[in-house]
Image (cartoon, grey):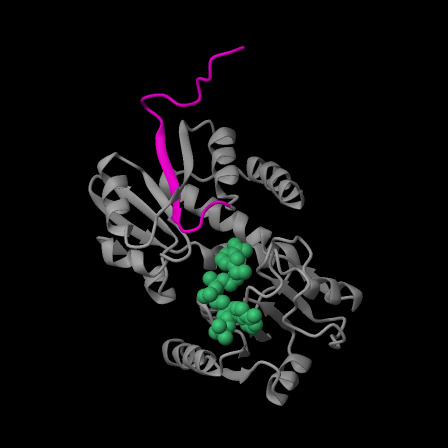
Amino acid sequence: MHLDLRVNGSTKLTGLIGNPVEHTVSPVLQNSLFSVTGINGVYLPLKVPEGSLRDAVNGLKAVGFAGFNVTIPYKGAIMEYLDEINEEAKLLEAVNTVKITGDRLVGYNTDGDGFLRAFSEQTGTGFTRKSVCILGAGGTARTLAIKIALEGANKICIINRTLSSAIKLTEKINQIISGASAFAAAAGSAESMLALARCDIIINATSVGMHPDTEASPLEEGFSLRQEQIIYDVIYNPVETKLMALARRSGCIAVNGAGMLFYQGVKAFEIWNGSIIPAKKLEDISKIFLKYLQG
Ligand code: NAP
């Protein structure tokens, strides 16, 4: 038997607010980052019931939290309670990281940069002059589409079940990013099929195929992919979705969302702690974390 000395009166407090939070893996990542960097801190899942966001934010501020992540359904609603929102989060209309300094709350978005870093590391390429199809028009699709447009993609087709949401997103992209060329198509339409057949990169930013609905896929089983197309799925549970299995069988590079999850968390950690994690430590923890996600 031994005493657990990990938490004491000087421990830095961080966490994740959302609802639900039961299945989050962020505490595993963040507490491991505290451990490898030797920073005295802890990260907790904090379930915030509907209607309690204001109380939760005031409570975290009152007890001296250093910062927190924000997940579904509060990435937009949190903005009302912040003293400042950085340019990136304003552009993406979503905050997933809040830093508390004194009584000031500053909001950031680390999802977009986390995605770009993971995509470039895992596929060895970027989006400049590429033609990209994004499946979905929700919060994640918006973040990815805007970042991809800013990276200089040649064409972006937003394909969604609800066409009106896809149109709204393309209008925003074309309006705020000069030179962007985004267009919308309804899922399953002839226009979407043509765009999917011609593009370089297909990104699934819907929740279709996510646990427990692992038999579902945003593209049909027999969908024909070209070997040189890259398929990126934001889902990381399961580690190989139906869509990724289809891509693998077609000889394509297929990547899941675990890398994005990892790097958005790393960036949030660096915002709270004001320190950059050394590359070797990051590489080591990345390997262990990705293995952990594989179960
Ligand atoms: P969201 O805002 O609710 O958007 C969901 C999107 O999925 C919408 O476009 C919706 O279409 C579509 N969709 C949902 N069910 C569908 C169905 N049965 N058939 C066709 N389309 C369907 O959700 P979100 O926050 O963007 O999250 C999307 C996914 O990204 C989730 O799986 C989430 O776990 C994942 N994610 C991963 C990371 C990471 O770090 N890897 C980070 C954030 C999110 P409609 O508009 O027609 O409803």
Residue 140 vertical placement versus 154 (above, below): above
Could you tell me which residue is drawn at 44 percent across and 50 percent down? 20
Q: As rendered, which of 86 and 18 lies closer to the eye?
A: 18
Most foreground residue, 243 or 263: 243
Magenta residues, start to end: 1-22
Q: Residue furthest bottom?
A: 190
Asked if residue 251 shows in the view, the reply is yes
In the displayed structure, does residue 293 sit left or right of residue 107? Answer: right
Q: Main secondary structure of the magenta part?
A: loop
Who is closer to the viewer here, 169 or 124? Answer: 169
What residue sits 45% from the left and 47% below the top?
A: 21
x, y percentage for residue 237? 61, 53
Measured from the top left, where is residue 247 in percent x and y? 73, 66
* The C terminus lies in quadrant: top right
Position above or below: 88 against 83:
below
In this rendering, position of residue 181 left or right of residue 104: right
Question: Residue 111 in the image: x percent, y percent?
Answer: 46, 56
For image coordinates 39% across by 78% down, the residue present is 172
Q: Is residue 72 left or right of residue 227?
A: left
Q: Is residue 19 left or right of residue 293?
A: left
Task: Report how many numbered discs are placed on residues in the image.
Answer: 0
- The quadrant the N terminus occupies is top right
Question: Is 241 rendered above or below residue 282?
Answer: below
Q: Is residue 77 magenta?
A: no
Q: In this rendering, does residue 135 appear at all? A: no
Q: Is residue 17 highlighted in magenta?
A: yes
Q: Nearer the viewer, residue 75 or 286?
A: 75
